[in-house]
Amino acid sequence: MTDSSTEFTTPVRIEVFVRAHASAAVVESLRELVARARRLEDALDAAVHVSTWTAVRPSLEELSDSGPSITETIEAFQSWANREGYDLEPAFDWRETPSMIGHRAAEVRVPTVCVAVYTDGDLQCVAPCADGDCTYTVVDCLSRLEEGIIAPFEDRDDGTRGSSAEQYARPEDSE
């Protein structure tokens, strides 16, 4: 990951993914998170893009004429996590699901909200994620970005890291 003392001197892109079938109980909280991300457009001269996504079965997505967009995004996130020593679970849940014709298919369940931060097109961080000791939430990521810190999950000077809560991290069991 990038040096945590790096200020935003390169083009920054912040992507916010909101699960399309999120519970109505979290809509207001999601609005507030999206508004925080949007404020970073002015504060950091960042490009902020908000989109919806949903659980995906990679084998079905491959059949689409548009190709595997969600699967490729999740694979890029997983590659970042592997390289940087983070884990995307439990926020991203890989499981096998039965089909009506008796076959099993892989499915990736996505978190209610996710943030990915890029500089010069390179993925710098994904939230939520965990490092074994701490879970790093979207709230943690946005707070650090608001402080102007590009690597939000590096050790803080005050000794705090991440959150013990998994707010907005765990996928819901039903969609």
Image: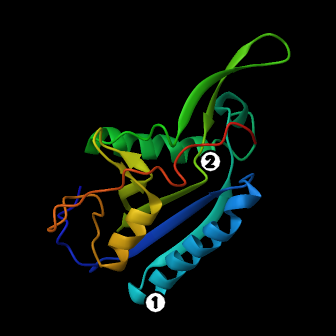
Q: Regarding mark 1 in the picture, which secondary structure is present there?
A: helix
Residue 95, x across and y down, in percent: 59, 25
Vertical arrangement, residue 17 with respect to residue 86, above or below:
below
Name which residue lies at 74% across and 38% down. 174
Question: What amino acid type is highlighted by mark number 2?
Answer: Ser
Vertical arrangement, residue 47 with respect to residue 89, above or below:
below
- Choose mark 1 or mark 2, whichever is in front: 1
Is 169 or 78 nearer to us in this picture? 169
Residue 137, x across and y down, in percent: 43, 56
Is 26 or 74 nearer to us in this picture? 26
Is 133 or 87 nearer to us in this picture? 133
User: Furthest residue to the top?
Assistant: 102
Real-space Cα distance between discs 1 and 2?
28 Å
Residue 101 quadrant: top right
Residue 59 quadrant: top right
Question: What amino acid type is highlighted by mark number 1?
Answer: Asp
In this rendering, does residue 42 appear at all?
A: yes
Disc 1 or 2, which lies upstream in sequence?
1
Vertical arrangement, residue 125 with respect to residue 95, above or below:
below
Residue 104, x across and y down, in percent: 70, 15
User: What residue did someone put label 2 on?
Assistant: 69
User: What residue did someone put label 1 on?
Assistant: 42
Q: In this rendering, would 168 be left or right of 155?
A: right
Is 48 or 86 nearer to us in this picture? 86
